[in-house]
Image: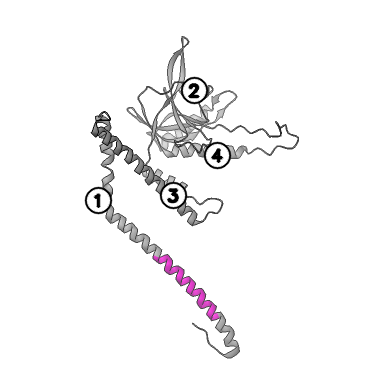
Amino acid sequence: MASSSSSGLTFKLHPLVIVNISDHYTRVKSQMNPPPLTSTSATVNGVEPLQQAPRVYGCVIGVQRGRTVEIFNSFELLYDPSTHSLDRPFLEKKQELYKKVFPHFYILGWYSTGSDAQESDMHIHKALMDINESPLYVLLNPTINPAQKDLPVTIYESELHVIDGIPQLIFVRSSYTIETVEAERISVDHVAHLKPSDGGSAATQLAAHLTGIHSAIKMLNSRIRVLHHYLVGMQKGDVPCENSLLRQVSSLLRRLPAIESEKFQDDFLMEYNDTLLITYLAMFTNCSSTMNELVDKFNTAYDRHSRRGGRTAFI
């Protein structure tokens, strides 16, 4: 496997693809759910053997505009691991259905799960070359690594290399960026703020939300500091001047002053006032509910006394 691709293509991956692959893997893993091993089962040094994690397979679809490949969505595939073959009728049917809904989307490649690309993966890769002459391979690593900061997603391309005098197709890594649209941002934000199954309180969710915002602001601040130190070094002559990089920095910094516009201030104050109004209404509702409970208690107490001494109700 080569270290990096030399095709010059730019890949943009949408979050929906990552969510689909993760959901596919989670469902297959939950459906397997093997029964617990009995006491008569074979063990090694008193430890029960672990079940091998399932691998899932599917197609990724999207569009290619010039040298830019944008991966929008994905769907599952039926794969026979014994023969290393795909269910072609199922693939063609899914492709036809997606063409009716998304006529501009094409099959760009396929996806799977695992820590690294395997030799058997090339069989699937070659099987899709009649649909796309140069398919891409999206690999999701489901293993949790707390020390890893990057997404556990790798995109591979195939290149023809001569090895020991024999031309062979090999997988090469390609860089990519995450691209989102408004609908995806709303959906991902909704998934991220779902109430946990263990009955977490609203305060816990709010704390997690504020922690995420704080981490994002902290990350933005650190990256701006890196740009600032780089520009200062370039101004002093410690770093060579690169016009292409300066244009990218200028394009990025032009977005930051947008938050100081009058429209932003008006929208911010409107949202802030709406939030305060909702808070006040919630407080009034809570006070009214407490007052009603107190009045009910007084009425109950005075009803008991009125039966004895003829007193009337408080309200």
Q: Nearer the viewer, mark 3 or mark 2?
A: 3
Alpha carbon separation for disc pair 1 and 3: 27 Å
Q: Position of residue 300 (x, y in %)?
A: 56, 80
- From what the image shows, is residue 266 above or below residue 187? below
What's the magenta region? Answer: 280-299
Percent position (x, y) of residue 32? 62, 37
- Residue 67 painted magenta: no
Callout 1 secondary element: loop
Residue with the mark numbered 2: 127
- Could you tell whether 82 is left or right of 160 in the image? right
Please state if 302 lies on the left or on the right of 219 as rendered: right
Q: Give me the residue at 50% from left, 83% from top.
A: 314
Residue position marked by numbered label 3 in the rendering: 211
Q: CA distance from mark 1 to mark 2?
A: 54 Å
Q: CA distance from mark 1 to mark 4?
A: 45 Å
Which of disc 4 and disc 3 is earlier in sequence?
4
Q: Amino acid at mark 1?
A: Ser
Q: Secondary structure at mark 3?
A: helix
Answer with the quarter of the image where residue 36 lies.
top right
Of the residues shown, which amino acid type is indicated by label 4? Thr
Instruction: Report which residue position mark 1 lands on.
Output: 261
What's under tag 3, amino acid-wise? Answer: Thr
- Number of other residues with Cα within 10 Å of mark 4, as a class: few under 14, some 14 to 19, many 20 or more: some
Q: Check disc 2 and give the amino acid type.
A: Ala
